[in-house]
Image (tube, coloured by chain):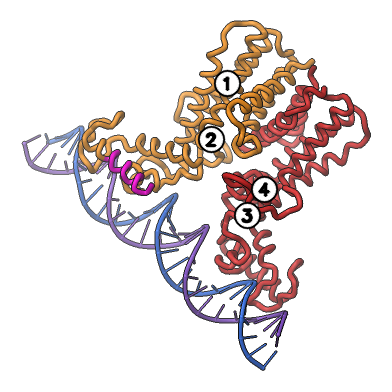
Chain colours: A orange, B red, C blue, D purple
Amino acid sequence: MQANSEATGEAEREAARTGVAGSGTRGKGRYHHGDLRNALIRAAIELAAEGGPDAVVLRAAARKVGVSATAAYRHFDGQTDLLGAVKDYGQQRLVASMEDCGREVGGQGPEAARERMMALGRGYIRFARREPGLYRTAFCHKALGSLGITAEGVVEDRGPLTLEARSFEMLTDTLDEAVAVGLIAPERRPGAELSAWAMVHGAAMLFLDGPLGALGEEQADYVIERVVGDVVAGLMSP
Amino acid sequence: MQANSEATGEAEREAARTGVAGSGTRGKGRYHHGDLRNALIRAAIELAAEGGPDAVVLRAAARKVGVSATAAYRHFDGQTDLLGAVKDYGQQRLVASMEDCGREVGGQGPEAARERMMALGRGYIRFARREPGLYRTAFCHKALGSLGITAEGVVEDRGPLTLEARSFEMLTDTLDEAVAVGLIAPERRPGAELSAWAMVHGAAMLFLDGPLGALGEEQADYVIERVVGDVVAGLMSP
DNA sequence: CCCCGAAGTTGACGGCGTCAACATGCAATC
DNA sequence: GATTGCATGTTGACGCCGTCAACTTCGGGG
């Protein structure tokens, strides 16, 4: 595996040398990589996917790319910053998974709205199950994401919209629709996203760390339906 | 702070020397501590309480106690094992918090059962809010607890009952009561603990890492009532 | 009384994040 | 087209971490 790592590094470096790298600019020389930032992020994503946030080791990522450890400091503030980039990627993938599941259900009316809520939860939990390392990294509390928040105030904002907010927004939109269509009583609307979010996030944790980890795809889907169904039922109740 | 650490270490060691330590045996000599295992656990608990599972650093715990780092290996398999001990402690405290809140509500009948479920959720989330470091450590997925589970089979079982199971048991008991008393329909019972557990765990995470972190005690309590109320409502629905 | 094994120590190794000082080479300037 | 400047990488070092091997100390059972 060490050999494997090194091989990957050499391959990456060779790609840079010959200018074959997908998103490399024109780097044919061997000293300058050409697209080191993205290469490091890709390597870090692999590490995170395999071992979660704790596996995102700066030196390991540099090794994978075939570059010295300190080279990373030209593109990141440090390990935390690199981890933050992976976090952003994970949240992006989570949003994509939710969108994939949400797209499958069309139509309008109460039943469609209910189905859309179920689909969102399904997409969320499925991503957590399929990419546990990335999911954990996406919700790693160290590691500032694109929106860095410290004790007081925003530190930096790299993207047009916080990714964390993006998935949350999908949820609020669907809840709004559920109210508009008469599925959820308006007086039950405020705070509803908290319950829904807590439920899916908690369920995901039960799958990753808790007693649900050993379940197969089929049983897992049943549990997901049950859990998401419960929270929807709770929101619908008088 | 380094000086502080050292001072604490010296104090601890002095206590051992003079035999004043609370649970120390008869260790008046300076070479043998007398109760190092528990002293290390206490130190590690402090670290966890202040900085979460990542702060449980073996060398730091040893330093606090005033002992060489490798001394810990006479009492623990390694850092993971020490972390596991803290994890057990955290789960114990969680159970205590749930019991405290649960004890406050007496009586029988549907309303009492509902109140008891609410109380359990309150105790859970309150503990997470009051002791975020310990809570995170209690649910840290690395760190084998008293019941160590690896790929296949149980590794060791130090306690009479898994602590993780203990808090889970409180929940199932309360749900059983809710069914017996007619609050929850029997056909809705199987799997209900999953929804309840997921909801409180997810809510706790929203408080610790998510957008609910900045809330004051009063607003937090409101959110807790809302969230726990939603899951109970979901379980009660036809 | 002795001595043996449990409990702690020192020293070392490799890996980590990070900093300072140095090397390289692309690109804009004259 | 040669010169030079600055972004980009490299080497070496520091202090921290977890862990192992070998040595030292001590207290209780023959």
Q: Is residue C18 above or below residue A233?
A: below
Which residue is drawn at the image coordinates 60% and 50% (left, top)? B143
Q: Quadrant of residue A98?
A: top right
Q: Is residue A189 above or below residue B115?
A: above
Q: Secondary structure at mark 2?
A: helix
- Amino acid type at circle 1 is Glu
Image quadrant occupied by the C terminus of chain A: top right
Say which of B92 and A210 sits in front. A210
Residue pointed to by mark 4: B134
Of all chains, the one bearing label 1 is A
Residue pointed to by mark 1: A169
Which residue is drawn at the image coordinates 23% and 33% (left, top)? A19
- Camera-near label (1 vs 2) is 2
- In the rendered image, residue C19, in percent from the top left (x then y), is placed at 39, 53
Q: Secondary structure at mark 4?
A: helix
Q: CA distance from mark 4 to mark 3?
A: 9 Å
Q: Are marks 4 and 1 on the same chain?
A: no
- Residue that lies at the very extreme toward the top in this rendered image: A108
Residue pointed to by mark 2: A132
Q: CA distance from mark 3 to mark 1?
A: 37 Å
